[in-house]
Amino acid sequence: MSDSTNNKASLLEARDLVLSSGAAFSFSADKGQVLWAHGNCEEIYDVLSGLVPPIKGEVIFQGFRWRELDPFAECRARAQIGRVFPHDKAWIENLSLRMNVGLRVLHAGFLTADQVNEEIALLAAIFDVTQHLDERPEGAAASVLERCQWVRAFLGTPSLLLFDNSDTVPGISHTVQLREQVSKYIASGGTLIWSGAEPPGDESDLGVPEIRRISIRDTNSREETCSDYE
């Protein structure tokens, strides 16, 4: 496992970023790579996906700076990013899980409604949530919500996947299916940034030569881990 470096034009570039929490880092990510950051990186993911501007530095995604995109272009670019959120920020409560899962891809217009529904059905079967798709978030079990997040994240095969694994629901029995889906995603050229107490697996499991750790320093002189920036 090696530290990531920012050495060439990439799918995603984080250039000399400083966040409001004090987290500071630079890295680049290319197609088919896996990066890992220790702990909960919610604010970092917000900045990388253009939802929140950094205090300093810039983020370049697919060759475009978030701050230079108009609202329509920004929406379409962000639709290329799949994400697993902290559970308390993952859902629109008055929509079914099916509608929640499909919103990112439907709004961007990358797929037709029939194509979206077909892909949702396939992923829901893999993660065993087919029977729960018409439920609303407030009535679904925590393990169901977790797996529906996985369906949403992989839907449409996004260019970049930001996966927050810091508060995974204990007792979920579908980690084999998740690992297999991650491996397929990486093999297809997708880029994964994973946050959690442990990396997403061994290099051999994921079919990559290395898992690159994102080095994050704290300008407030606290411990150098994402978990300090919640």
Image: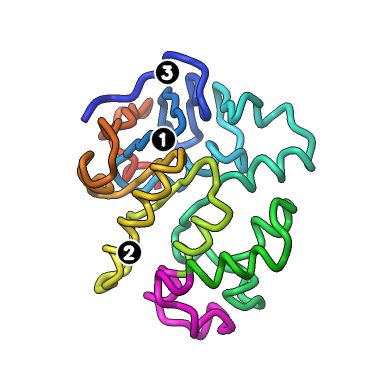
The residue under the point 26% across, 70% down is 170
Question: From mark 2 to mark 3, how far is it between C-alphas?
Answer: 32 Å
Are the residues flagged by discs 2 and 1 in contact, CB closer than 8 Å?
A: no
Q: CA distance from mark 2 to mark 1?
A: 19 Å
Give the crowd class for mark 1: few <14, some 14-19, many >=20 residues within 10 Å.
some
- Point out the tag, 2 or 3, that comes first from the N-terminus: 3
| Mark 2 Cα-neighbour bin, 10 Å: few <14, some 14–19, many ≥20 | few
Question: Does dot 2 land on a helix, a strand or a loop?
Answer: helix
For the point 64% across and 56% down, which residue is it? 104
Q: Position of residue 190 (x, y in %)?
A: 46, 41
The dot on residue 177 is 2
**Residue type highlighted by circle 3:** Asn
Picture quarter containing residue 121?
A: bottom right
**Mark on residue 6?**
3
- Examine the rendered structure and indicate whether residue 130 appears above or below residue 19: below
Q: Which residues are magenta?
A: 124-147
Q: Which mark is residue 74?
A: none
